[in-house]
Amino acid sequence: MKTLAQITFALLALAATLHAQGNHYYDLAQERGPATIHFSVGTLLGPLKGDDRFHGAGDLGLEVASATFPFGTGRLMTASTGPIVMVEPEIHGWIPNPIPGFPHLADVYFRGAECYFDSSTFPIDPATGNYTGGGTITFTAGEIELNAISTSTIMPLAGLGSDIFQISGSLNQFGGKVEFTCSFAHQFVGDVGGFSIAVNLGGVLYGATTIPGLALSLNISTLTAGQLASFDCSGGLPQSPIYLGASTRGTGSNPINALHVICDLLQPIPVKSGLTDAAGNCSWAIQVPNFPGLSVWFQTIQMGLKSPVVATAIQ
């Protein structure tokens, strides 16, 4: 016969399983590059001069009630790929000495920081995608070193967590893409070697990913000069516009803001456009120019979606 504790545990496990089945989890990549996090330190001797920002690389974890818009609710979580990692080896701030030529009153070094963002569940506006909620930061690595008045103290950051602070931003879907922004600002107040400091962190996090079930791909037949070649796309948004681009210069990075994608071709040239069928497929038969030996790079793009670049050459 099961005890009351065993029954309670089983019910809690079942509830957690049903909750996980009903929600969707995203790892959101910072495709715009590492987030800029503003950094400042205040002390009883005045504010620090010097570095005032660093960059955090890594994915953002997000759990939503629905995988597509409207998302219902959201919750920041640790990404399955790991924490946000400080890019710079260290940043340095100091309190200048009012007497010219004398050493700084204090030097502060912030290095090796790794952290993750978490939050309580917040509602997402079904019309605009905007939200406001309460978030926290927890550090998993890093340290603050303080050198002042002939003393040196190091405060480990691992295990340091914040109080709850306000986060706000938006979560929207653009075709095959989910885009997330999160604005935050928080102050950590502490004591380092008997020296009171207030560390301010703030910035805007950005993350994006592809909605489940989509994986746009491009297959190209052999390019023979003067002959027709087939360009076959699959895995795209169904019954939606699709564009084929080419480059003879190689790969690059070209944001196409209207389509919410970053084209991976250098100086891309539009080649064809069309409409996918109900299965998300599209094909073109294209006359190959008479330039044997020419290297060409191709990519297809839809709203919020792109295929891997296909590199080939004319035979």
Image: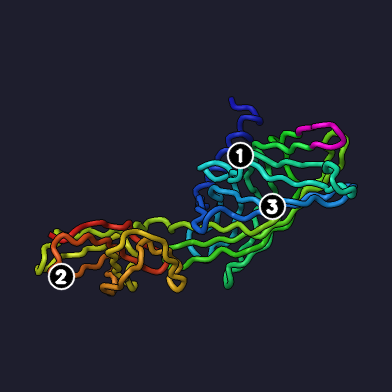
As measured in the structure, the alpha-carbon distance from the residue carrying label 3 to the one carrying label 2 is: 56 Å
- The C terminus - image quarter: bottom left
At 56% from the left edge and 48% from the top edge, which residue is drawn? 57
Which span of residues is magenta-colored? 147-154
On whether residue 152 falls in the magenta region, the answer is yes
Tell which circle, 3 or 1, labels the residue nearer the N-terminal end: 1
Residue 26: x and y, percent?
50, 52
Query: Few, some or many C-alpha atoms within 10 Å of disc 1 (few <14, some 14-19, many ≥20)?
Result: few
Q: Is residue 74 left or right of residue 109?
A: left
* Closer to viewer: mark 3 or mark 1: 3
Tell which circle, 3 or 2, labels the residue nearer the N-terminal end: 3
At 65% from the left edge and 36% from the top edge, which residue is drawn? 141
Asked if residue 6 can be seen in this view, the reply is yes
Query: Few, some or many C-alpha atoms within 10 Å of disc 2 (few <14, some 14-19, many ≥20)?
Result: some
Which disc number belongs to residue 289? Answer: 2
* Closer to viewer: mark 3 or mark 2: 2
In the image, is residue 48 above or below residue 129? above
Name the amino acid, label 1. Answer: Leu
Name the amino acid, label 2. Answer: Pro
- The N terminus - image quarter: top right
Which disc number belongs to residue 135? Answer: 3
Q: Residue furthest left?
A: 227
Residue behind mark 1: 12
* Closer to viewer: mark 1 or mark 2: 2
As measured in the structure, the alpha-carbon distance from the residue carrying label 3 to the one carrying label 1 is: 25 Å
Tell which circle, 1 or 2, labels the residue nearer the N-terminal end: 1
